[in-house]
Amino acid sequence: MRFHIAADAAATAEMAADSVEGVIRSNPRASIGLATGATMVGVYRSLVRRCREGPLSFAETTVYLLDEYIGLDADHPQTYRNVITRSFTELVDLRDDAVFAPDCQAPGLDIEARRYDRLVRAADIDIQLLGIGRNGHIAFNEPGTPFDAETTVVSLSEATRRDNARFFDSAEEVPLQAITQGIGTILQAKQILLVAQGSHKSRPIRDALEGPVTTEVPASALQLHGDVSAVFDLEAASRLSTGHPQV
């Protein structure tokens, strides 16, 4: 696992974007796994700028969303597909038919979850972007999730719903369920890029990357993967042991 510690959130986003750009430059047809959340806003902003100002192109790239809410109308601004569209995919030269997400309007959601799992695994994701929750969750995989879990329908914990309430008009509007890639599905990616910013992420970062591998800290499963890069700002990295490179 490679740790990189940047001076601030802006530098963290640029460093994460560097990793994504490197993958695309080496393979223009790369499959990219996209995460949502406040941590990724700066990363996508940097990639959009690079695409518009320079030779970086997503024209041959395909992207796959990590998860999606259940219970929101397709045109709701907080569906993850719409968030990704506004912040990234419609702002670069990515084809409309190159964006894949779980269809949470499907009549059989368990069947849809299995379909999406097969799709993601067949895509052979080149780099998967990940954030981390306060309790160490990745995607919507809460503590106790088996490390071999596949894409499935999950109920969101109250803690997760409270954390996500800032994106809605009220806490009551936050969906109760989602379709999420399972930990086992995530670990199939060739490379994983974990990004975190802020002091509130320091404890889960330490527990996930330097603590024991346990289902009680879902992100600790990343220790089992052979190619993980972790990019943090100084606050997020503040509880890590010394010896990790600072840029």
Image (cartoon, rainbow, N blue to C red):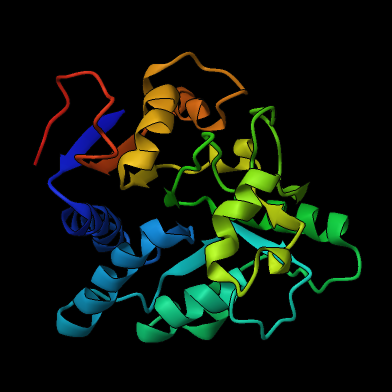
Between 62 and 8, the residue placed more toward the observer is 8
Identity of the residue furthest to the right in this view: 107
Tell me which corner region of the image, top left, top right, bottom left or bottom right, holds residue 11. Answer: bottom left
Between 115 and 42, the residue placed more toward the observer is 42
Q: Is residue 137 left or right of residue 236?
A: right
State the count of labels: 0
In the image, residue 15 lies at what x, y percent? Answer: 19, 53
Which residue appears at 66% of the width and 58% of the height? 119
The quarter of the rendered structure image containing the C terminus is top left
In the depicted structure, whether residue 235 falls above or below residue 97: above
In the image, residue 95 lies at what x, y percent? Answer: 47, 83
In the depicted structure, whether residue 194 falls above or below residue 217: below
In the depicted structure, whether residue 99 falls above or below residue 201: below
Between 32 and 241, the residue placed more toward the observer is 241
In the depicted structure, whether residue 86 falls above or below residue 61: below
In the image, residue 210 lies at what x, y percent? Answer: 37, 18
Which residue appears at 48% of the width and 23% of the height? 224
Q: Is residue 2 left or right of residue 164?
A: left
Between 96 and 104, the residue placed more toward the observer is 104
Identity of the residue furthest to the top in this view: 212
The quarter of the rendered structure image containing the N terminus is top left
Say whether residue 122 is visible: no
Q: Is residue 149 left or right of residue 243?
A: right
Tell me which corner region of the image, top left, top right, bottom left or bottom right, holds residue 77. Answer: bottom right
Q: Is residue 73 left or right of residue 22?
A: right
In the image, residue 121 lies at what x, y percent? Answer: 62, 49
Say whether residue 239 is visible: yes
Which residue appears at 57% of the width and 18% of the height? 214
Which residue appears at 23% of the width and 18% of the height? 241
